[in-house]
Image (cartoon, helix red, strand yellow):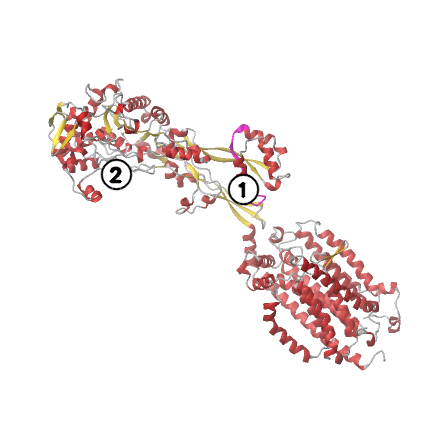
Amino acid sequence: MPLFDRKDKSRYATFTRRTLTMGGGIAAIMTALGARLYQLQILEGEEFMTRADENRVNQRLLAPLRGRILDRFGVELATNRRNYRVDLIPEQALEGVDAALDTIGRIIVITSRERERILHDIAENKHFVPTTIAENLTWDEFARVNLHLPYLPGIQPEVGETRNYPFGDQLSHVLGYVAAVSPDDKTNDDDPLLDLPGFRIGKRGIEKAFDLQVRGTAGASRVEVNAYGRVIRELGRDPGAPGADVYLTIDNEVQKFVAQRLGNESAACVVMDVANGDVIAMASTPGYDPNDFNVGITETQWKGLNEDDHHPLINKVLSGVYPPGSTFKPAVALSALDSGLLPADFSVNCTGSLQFGNYVFHCWKKGGHGHVDLHRGIAASCDVFFYEVAKRVGIDTIENGAHKLGLGYQTHIEIPGEKAGVIPGRAWKEATLHLPWQQGETLNTGIGQGYVLVTPIQLCMLAARVASGNQVVPRIVHVVGHTVEQRPQLKRLEFSDAALAAVQSGMNAVTNEPGGTAYAWRIPNPGFEMAGKTGTAQVRRISKEEHLAGVKKNDELPWNLRDHAHFIAYAPADKPRYALSILLEHGAVTSHPHVQMARDILLFTQQRDPANMTAGYPVNAADNGGARL
Amino acid sequence: MSSRPYAAARRTLSVGEKLLEINWGLVVLITMVACVGFAMQYSVAGGRFQPWAAPQMERFVVGLAILVAIALVDIRIWMSLAYPAYGAALLLLVATTVVGHLGNGAQRWIALGPLQLQPSELMKISLVLALARYLHGLSVEDVSKPLRLAIPLGMIVVPTVLVLMEPNLGTATILMADGCSLLFLAGLSWWWIAPVVTGVVAAVPIAWQFLLHDYQKRRVLTFLNPANDALGAGWNISQAEIAMGSGGFGGKGFVQGTQSQLNFLPEKETDFILTALGEEFGFVGCIALMLLFATVIFYGIRIAMASRSQFGRLLAMGITLNFFFYIMINAAMVMGMIPVVGIPMPLISYGGTAMLTVMFGFGLLMSVHVHRQVEIPRSSGGII
């Protein structure tokens, strides 16, 4: 066979032809690839550039500093403190997480439950995410950790900020507390801060009412992250805005005195400036330590607070509704006198009871008071006198007068959770019980029993209104940030001066005239005398048999069956400046401990006289609102 | 091609003469392409030679030595080794498949002493060698005879099926493409080509139903709609496109690509290295690399056309086309034009076997060039 034949030539020609064909195909495909490059990089380059940036840039929220809450003299009631904590970065723990926890466990205490929580958190997160091992460390503990730091790989000491209530349970029901965000908190609030781990939100009291103002505005840090979310570097930072400070009308010294004086009794007390309604002290005892809620309350603590029969979680000043008992009598007297249906010299003969239809209405004094006019009726708190007054003027007059005094409505003080109470009337009974009004009920209403319900803050407002003759409204917040809170112009009460003077005279007699129900616990210091009115809210029902056999004295009953004891007062009696209301649950005993408390509190308040001291509100705020002080 | 007198070229050359005959221009071109690879290995490691750039350079040096050594070996020796090489590669492939079935899932590697071998890579070269040898013995008319055609078809189909079973769709595609291209170049009649192409198109739905693994189907589906699975398999494609596209005209700069440096890019040092280049050097960089590749392919085609033996022509074209198919599939894959099939970019992607196989192939191409004047009788082809 020859080396080259015709067939070889033909297949070389075929090969060449087809190779060139394929070369053309290759060129076409390369061109297509180039076209795709052009499309991706030139035509759509901008869009992909944006997407690449979206990939790598993350916004990290920075929690703003929460605004402080201060008293009228600038004393910090709620503030922020350094939170010394220790974090662990798992990937930097060279000998493993367990070994790292063992080592740190020799320096600070880590319980087995905490350890479990830490290991759980570490397992949940990426290995470069810091996990908090312990927080709220003392300075000593923190210093010890820092000292041993060279031998603690992966351990990272950090200093954060957390809420602090330096006065603990002394102000619990005024300030409320902050706690971790719950899912419910997010339903009407889309602030991204709520998703920040460890963020705290106001849950009660001023912390809740002014949460939005105190919270501040989130800052942000723009960081570059890699595909696993690890932060590579910070690109920019917006520090956000700290929350506004809130200045209360509270005088922390009076508050402290009130809290100490109430002690651990189940009690409520408010002290108010009658000139403008500024609440100088407000306490509901027992309270709770708001710091516990911030740090995280244990289940046992929570159970204890809930099951306590002294109800430490309820702000009795605003949320506790009680029959006012005889503290309602000044309101009845004012309504009656002003209505014109009651002559000024009206008097009755109290025999200890009053027959009305088939019912016998008893006076608290078994033997009766004898001849009683309005002055003595208030001073001696004669029930029969007020039965007669109520019978004479009717429920409509009483209802109307009580409403004019602000009873039966919320006072709209800035702390959430306030109850409105009840001032009964024909329309009210028809609407709620679908029954017609009975005249016997008018008599009961006349002595503050039956359907009447009030809160201690309403009673304090009643005292302030009777004392000043003005429509005083209680307020507890004076300045938020640099803005003075708006207050309505003070108006006179719609009662005649004569009626007011008669009731004031009766209340003065309660404490300052022999025969007055609180004469034994008067303020003897000249110029500091108080006027007041006692009251007892019946807790149990007294049967006909017991009335016949003789009503048991409260002193003889177990604590939880004793009547609640009220007292309202203002001082000085002749030139009123401070009004007070106090409630001692199950405290109606002969020694009148609540009147003793009221006496001490009003004397202390007058001697300190916070209303006439220079306030500590921010300067420009004082410029705007100074006129009111 | 050469200024050397025809007669001088026909005798057997000495080793020194052969060294001079080596197409050093092509060697320089290959080195330039490899250097682009080193630069990108260095970049995706965050500006460090470890762990990828340095070993890749060492392998390239070894690869260059292999290239020269192979180029010096007479083309007729390679021709005589074609069938044994094919047989050995086939055996290894069967062994891998058996071992793979004993174990779980994909088995592409086999351990030969300290060496980790990918038999499917060896098969690409061996198949080209064996087909070139077989087709060398056939005239244009012979190629289209059914009995003559059955043998090369079997040589193509058997390893393709084995590789498909590994499963390695990308390599199987390249084997099939290599084989079919050689049959086409050898002069296969259009009467065969037209019906087969039609048949293959018709067979796609059947292959989908019975031949493809679930993960392969998922890749195809993901490719067709990446947004469907933006955080799963589609994530790779999306991130690759973002990297490529965000490079724009001029790129973000060397070691400045955010997608690659921040690890958004999957398999950035291997299959997706082109997108790192696209991100850091932009359109300009990619086109420059494509032009380098095109030039290498142009050299390969010229070498094939200049060879005086059909074996040499087919071998050169087989190697060149194999190189091209790698480039085409990888580039199309990372740019979202075809599904992700796991084919590296030759000379650029990090990887030992691929680098050595490619350099071995270029060695054979160079051998064809050095021995382009050698004439081999048609009768020495065939089965023997």
Q: Which residues are magenta?
A: A119-140
**Residue A482 in view here:** no
Q: Residue at x 66, y 49 (%)?
A: B46
Closer to us: A535 or A10 = A535
| Residue that numbered label 2 is attached to | A409
Residue A285, image x, y percentages: 35, 29
Closer to us: A11 or A295 = A295
Quarter placement of the N terminus of chain A: bottom right
Tell me which numbered mark, 2 or 1, is placed earlier along the sequence: 1
Closer to us: A293 or A149 = A293
Residue B304, image x, y percentages: 77, 71
Q: Residue furthest bottom?
A: A6
The residue carrying pointer 2 sits among few (fewer than 14), some (14 to 19) or many (20 or more) residues within 10 Å by Cα, namely some
Q: Give the structural element (helix, strand or loop) at label 1.
A: helix
Residue A474, image x, y percentages: 29, 33
Left-right relation of B280 to B122: left
Quick check: A472 above or below B342? above
Mark 2–mark 1 distance (CA, rounded to whole Å): 51 Å
